[in-house]
């Protein structure tokens, strides 16, 4: 029997789709791109209209051979890669490689991996969308041009291996500029006055000073606050006005990529990369036992809050059955498009909302269940009726000058809040019955000192929102932007806040000095809009590439012959003296961080580490010299002060024995090849114990495991957790 070859991107997706298609179909995975620009050369013929040179991706020869073998046995090839630009480009490359088979090659797309969606897609194949391919090709070429031409400038100043991506550098810029704002911020003092009042019946309620002589109070010091307090206490207080109304609170729309990443960061503590990895698993299919592999959510790279008529109907039916007829909101909800939204396909939603999180518990891992629960809940809440509050506002006058306000709020109908069970309970704020003219008395009234605060540092969630609001990047790029700037050591994440490293600030300082125009936020946002026009067939991709390449060449021409000036941007002269020639050492940068070097290079090649040397109250066992803490490529270590004459070293330990049974080693700080801190045994490689979390040596009170580790999160702060039984210990 003749077969149809279906090519997807991942093996997990292949298994799920194969189940729905059955006999007569061979479903194979390309495992991402099979062709790309070459690794070790630019691969773009600029003078030939930016023509790209595509080569086979390293390690994909076996996959291509298998696809060609299956194609030879097939009567048709259906390319079922993801439905975004990247997926369309992968499909085009597959067609270019498999096109010699002389059999029809068509494209199919689907927003969810369900039997109905797959069968409908197979029944209506289409041609590859070359406009979408060209938009991806233009983005890829621009990224290569920017990275390939600007990164070498950083290599001359710092070291080889740094990168200056087209979009990642704008993300770095936002973080560095926010850090400058924080450093330059000067706090201003201000005071507020609030307290408790009481009715004639003794019922107490909170209040706050709102106006003085009809204007917002500006109290900048204690003396002024005390004077106002005393003045209010001398006055007679009475209710001037009471207003009551119903207030509706609407649910947020269903998730798009950016809002899913932000919500998962805030509620679950997931990085953007982790969120997308788990969402991909839920989309491609999860084994549900007797049902086999099933796709649980719709496509997770989207900027649209739209819902299909079928999804809307199923969701509202579920709400009626579960919560009653009053739960669904009337009519279809239409949400405002975000800036630059392509609105190409639906919001992120469950493929079947009757697959509740509770029914999925036995089939999903902890993180998968948490993310699925978030998506399922948000989808249903977006269809539900608004929450209804009874809001009461009372204005109280103290004499003729001072207006104080008290607010009350009571939840009348929970609406969508009945579904959002994870949120902290909304506390009712009750006001006693008040009427105009009622006298009230002061129970307590105090002045509180405050200081204005600097803007907060970005978190992954808030940076994604900022990028989205400014039109920088697209749903598929947010996780990559955050991943790259952290992997390059430009940015560190502490708790949930993003801090620029010294290297990151130096890199942005260089880019700001010589390439500021091409890394302007508006410039990059305009580039995204032009790429959208290419996808819509309105612009030629070569013209768009040239439009943004030309300003880059102007900047590159301007720095020609300025090698010495570039290096001086980051080389700081120190008071340290070269041991060989007596010159003042300068601070330079290398793969292992900053170090001191002689400015007389290459005649004098003296260098030494830059770390703050901390003396230890012990002697070197080899030469009797002093011991000091130093920092190297793999973290802190103890070394002889007489290095390089004496090369004695030892590991810095935590003073905790290795928890591996029978091991006599100690736990020490180490660094991975990528510079990430972890903890391992000093007896390595004989003992392979390792932990990303810091061991404490404390016994778990639940299972008596001696390896409680230290964890940290934005919600919980620092706490201890047992890696065996998962028991948590909070202070």
Image: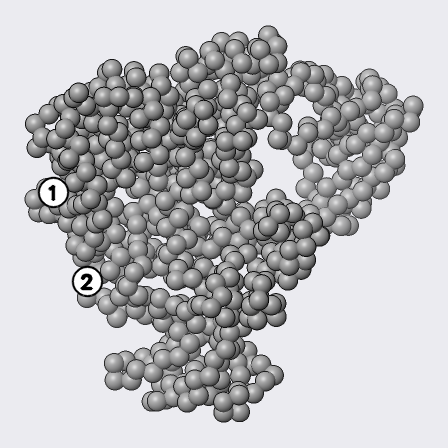
The residue located at (15%, 35%) in the rendering is 69
The residue located at (14%, 23%) in the rendering is 75
Query: In which quadrant is the N terminus drawn?
Result: top left
Q: Is residue 617 left or right of residue 20?
A: right
Q: Position of residue 442 (x, y in %)?
A: 87, 34
Does the image show residue 493? yes
The residue located at (30%, 69%) in the rendering is 567
Q: Which mark is residue 146?
A: none
Classed neighbour count for the residue bearing mark 2: other residues with Cα under 10 Å, few (<14), some (14–19), many (≥20)? few
The residue located at (37%, 56%) in the rendering is 488
Q: Quadrant of residue 565?
A: bottom left
Q: Find numbered disc 2 in the image and state the secondary structure of the residue it sits on.
A: loop
Mark nearer the viewer, 2 or 1 = 1
User: In the image shown, does 453 or 532 lie closer to the viewer?
Assistant: 532
Q: Is residue 168 left or right of residue 631?
A: left
Q: Is residue 335 above or below residue 673?
A: above
Q: Return the residue found at the far right.
A: 201
Task: Please give the residue where the numbered disc 1 appears in the rendered image.
Answer: 51
Measured in 3D between alpha carbons, the distance from the residue under mark 2 to the one under mark 1, in whole angstroms, is 26 Å
User: In the image shown, does 217 or 142 lie closer to the viewer?
Assistant: 142
């Amino acid at each position: 029997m003749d077969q149809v070859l279906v090519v997807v991107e991942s093996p997990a997706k292949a298994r799920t789709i194969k189940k729905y298609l059955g006999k007569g179909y061979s479903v194979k995975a390309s495992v991402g791109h099979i062709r790309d620009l070459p690794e070790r050369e630019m691969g773009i013929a600029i003078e030939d209209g930016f023509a790209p040179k595509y080569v086979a991706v390293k390690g994909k020869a076996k996959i291509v051979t298998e696809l060609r073998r299956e194609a030879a046995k097939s009567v048709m090839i259906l390319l079922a890669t993801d439905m975004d630009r990247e997926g369309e480009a992968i499909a085009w490359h597959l067609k270019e490689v498999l096109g010699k088979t002389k059999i029809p090659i068509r494209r199919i797309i689907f927003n969810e991996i369900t039997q109905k969606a797959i069968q409908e897609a197979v029944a209506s194949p289409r041609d590859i969308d070359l406009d979408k391919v060209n938009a991806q090709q233009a983005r890829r070429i621009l990224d290569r041009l920017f990275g390939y031409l600007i990164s070498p400038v950083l290599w001359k100043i710092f070291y080889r291996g740094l990168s200056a991506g087209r979009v990642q550098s704008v993300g770095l810029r936002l973080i560095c500029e926010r850090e400058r704002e924080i450093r330059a911020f000067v706090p201003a003092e201000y005071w507020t006055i609030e307290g408790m009042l009481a009715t004639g019946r003794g019922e107490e309620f909170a209040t706050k000073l709102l106006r003085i002589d009809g204007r917002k109070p500006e109290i900048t010091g204690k003396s002024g606050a005390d004077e106002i307090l005393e003045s209010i206490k001398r006055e007679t207080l009475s209710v001037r006005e009471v207003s009551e109304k119903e207030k509706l609170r609407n649910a947020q729309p269903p998730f798009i990529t950016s809002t899913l990443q932000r919500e998962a960061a805030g509620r679950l503590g997931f990085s953007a990369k982790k969120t997308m990895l788990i969402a991909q698993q839920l989309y491609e299919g999860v084994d549900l036992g007797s049902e086999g592999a099933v796709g649980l959510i719709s496509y997770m790279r989207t900027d649209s809050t739209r819902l299909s008529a079928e999804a809307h109907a199923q969701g509202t039916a579920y709400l009626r059955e579960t919560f009653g007829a009053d739960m669904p909101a009337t009519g279809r909800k239409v949400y405002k498009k975000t800036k630059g939204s392509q609105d190409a396909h639906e919001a992120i939603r469950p493929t079947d909302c009757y697959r509740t999180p509770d029914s999925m518990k036995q089939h999903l891992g902890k993180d998968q269940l948490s993310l699925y629960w978030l998506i399922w809940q948000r989808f249903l809440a977006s269809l539900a009726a608004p929450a209804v509050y009874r809001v009461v506002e009372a204005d109280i006058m103290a004499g003729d000058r001072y207006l104080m306000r008290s607010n009350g709020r009571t939840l009348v109908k929970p609406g969508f809040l009945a579904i959002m069970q994870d949120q902290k309970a909304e506390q009712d704020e009750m006001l006693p019955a008040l009427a105009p003219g009622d006298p009230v008395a002061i129970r307590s009234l105090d002045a509180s000192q405050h200081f204005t605060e600097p803007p907060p540092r970005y978190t992954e969630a808030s940076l994604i929102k900022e990028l989205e609001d400014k039109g920088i990047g697209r749903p598929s790029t947010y996780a990559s932007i955050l991943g790259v700037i952290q992997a390059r050591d430009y940015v560190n994440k502490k708790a949930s806040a993003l801090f620029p490293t010294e290297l990151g600030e130096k890199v942005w300082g260089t880019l700001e000095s010589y390439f500021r125009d091409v890394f302007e936020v508006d410039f990059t946002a305009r580039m995204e809009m032009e790429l959208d026009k290419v996808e819509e067939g309105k612009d030629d991709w070569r013209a768009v590439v040239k439009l943004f390449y030309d300003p880059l060449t102007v900047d590159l021409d301007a720095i020609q012959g300025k090698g010495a000036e570039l290096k001086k941007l980051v080389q700081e002269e120190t008071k340290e003296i070269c041991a060989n020639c007596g010159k003042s050492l300068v601070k330079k940068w290398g793969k292992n961080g900053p170090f001191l070097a002689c400015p007389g290079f290459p005649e004098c090649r003296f260098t030494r580490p830059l770390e703050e040397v901390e003396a230890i109250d012990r002697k070197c066992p080899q030469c009797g010299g002093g011991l000091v803490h130093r920092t190297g490529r793999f973290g802190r270590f103890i070394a002889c002060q007489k290095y390089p004459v004496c090369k004695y070293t030892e590991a810095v330990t935590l003073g905790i024995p290795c928890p591996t049974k029978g091991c006599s080693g100690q736990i020490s700080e180490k660094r991975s090849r990528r510079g990430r801190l972890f903890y391992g045994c000093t007896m390595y490689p004989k003992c392979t114990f390792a932990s990303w979390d810091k061991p404490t040596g404390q016994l778990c009170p639940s299972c008596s495991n001696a390896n409680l580790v230290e964890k940290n999160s934005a919600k919980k702060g620092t706490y201890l957790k047992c890696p065996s039984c998962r028991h948590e210990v909070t202070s």
